[in-house]
Amino acid sequence: MTFPIAPMQISGREVLPLVEGGKGVAASSGLSSGAWANAGGVGTFSAVNADHLDDNGEYIPLIYHGKSRIERHEELIAYSIAGGISQAKIAHDVAAGNGRIHMNVLWEMAASERVLRGVFEGAPDLIHGVTCGAGMPFKLAPLAAEYNAYYYPIISSARAFRALWLRSYRKVPEWLGGVVYEDPWLAGGHNGLSNSENPQQPEAPYSRVALLRQTMNEFGLQQVPIVMAGGVWALRDWSDWIDNTELGPIAFQLGTRPLLTQESPISDQWKRKLLTLKPGDISLNHFSPTGFYSSAVRNTFLHELEERAQRELAFVDHPAGDHVEPFVFGVRDRTVYVTQHDAQQAQAWQQAGFTKALTTPDSTLIFVSPERAQLIRKDQLDCMGCLSQCKFSNWSCNALNTTGRKADPRSFCIQLTLQNIVHGANPDDNLMFSGHAGYRFAKDPLYAEGNIPTVAELIEVIRRGD
């Protein structure tokens, strides 16, 4: 039995309204997206530092030769373009003319426009659409239209789409393929929570999507699909959204569930970890060097960041108020002033082995072990400029290549840990993005006894509503 979900016009062709979530840094590939398209849906490969494969399908690791950040930055861009082209070609071949192929980029990644242009030019006519989030991609519309590709902004509120439409998208409406509503409390990876929204108080997606549709209707976009992303697992959970006149045409994007397929490029170790997740194992955090909230598995990596943040105290350069206790730290024996209570707390942390005090941009100190301090400093020095601006390393894609702020040791090198986990490193020791429905792997009969389905088998189950 097939669940009552009808094909829909997406990126110039009638396909199943089932979209594979993009998932940055090689976690969705040409193989997985091609298989998704071959099964009749919309496959999405990640063009965020995509893996470059040679003509034999062998992975070509990126080895930096540049001594400076700028040199490494240029190497990363060149590799990203080559990787995106190779993934687009694989996706095209595997799709065998079926479905649609999209690529996903992070607007806040370094040189996102250069990467997009490079991939489009190197893989002409192979990419039907581009999804883009993590920022306000005003320039996405004219860029995609230049290459006859549909564009799909990823937003988390009607207000964000209104701003994009009025400033840019209204000038190129014919190439707006859809609007991806990515729920900021349910989706994996980076989330679009605004300053007015409470990360601890999720709002139901229906009313937010209904408001988005109302806004789109104001602009004459009644027939443009909304793609619901975040928390989508089984279509039965969304039966009241299908053929809903208030919401209009709705497609569904699945990001977490396709991780556990035979075509998924993530490691077997990561796949096995997904099968063990329980409710509460996935949470929002604010450690990302992008400045965005993100949803990830609460593993050893995330616990270390949480504990690091708990060993933090404020200081001043001169005695003031209750900050009168001198504290000396660093190789130059710098003296700052803290409260008496904080001085005692610092002593306790140092006695526990967290002997290195590191300054943050907010005139605070965090206390870490000597080994952790050495790793933090190495990762900051090895920065390759993967983001348009980075809290952790203070890199920025501006004329000075700096944010103008001190590097923040409370964060981490996101490029390093995401490359590590996708290429076989222990998923417990690295950032492990996941949507909040990830705990459902453990109880879903599709994955019983460790079964890992093919993409085609997964889509067949999804079409049944399960």
Image: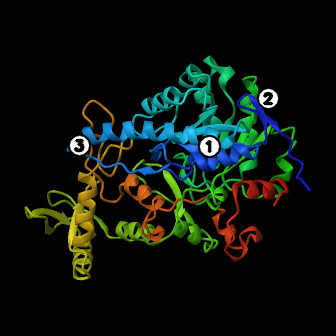
Amino acid tagged 1:
Thr
Q: Nearer the viewer, residue 167 or 130?
A: 130
Q: Earlier in the sequence, mark 3 or mark 1?
A: 1
Neighbour tally class for label 3: few under 14, some 14-19, many 20 plus, Cα within 10 Å: few
The number of numbered badges drawn on the structure is: 3
Task: State the residue at coordinates (9%, 64%).
Answer: 331
Compute the Cα span from label 3 to label 1.
31 Å
Q: Which mark is residue 44?
A: 1
Disc 2 + disc 1, Cβ < 8 Å: no
Q: Earlier in the sequence, mark 3 or mark 2?
A: 3
Examine the rendered structure and indicate whether residue 70 appears above or below residue 419.
above
Task: State the residue at coordinates (45%, 59%).
Answer: 423
> On the image, numbered disc 2 is attached to which residue?
223
> On the image, numbered disc 3 is attached to which residue?
66
Q: Earlier in the sequence, mark 2 or mark 1?
A: 1
Residue, far left: 332
Disc 3 + disc 1, Cβ < 8 Å: no
Amino acid tagged 3:
Gly
Neighbour tally class for label 1: few under 14, some 14-19, many 20 plus, Cα within 10 Å: many
Query: Which SS class for mark 3?
Result: loop
Kindly tell me whether residue 177 is visible in this rendering.
yes
Amino acid tagged 2:
Gln
Where residue 399 sits, quadrant-wise, is: top left
Q: Nearer the viewer, residue 317 or 276?
A: 276
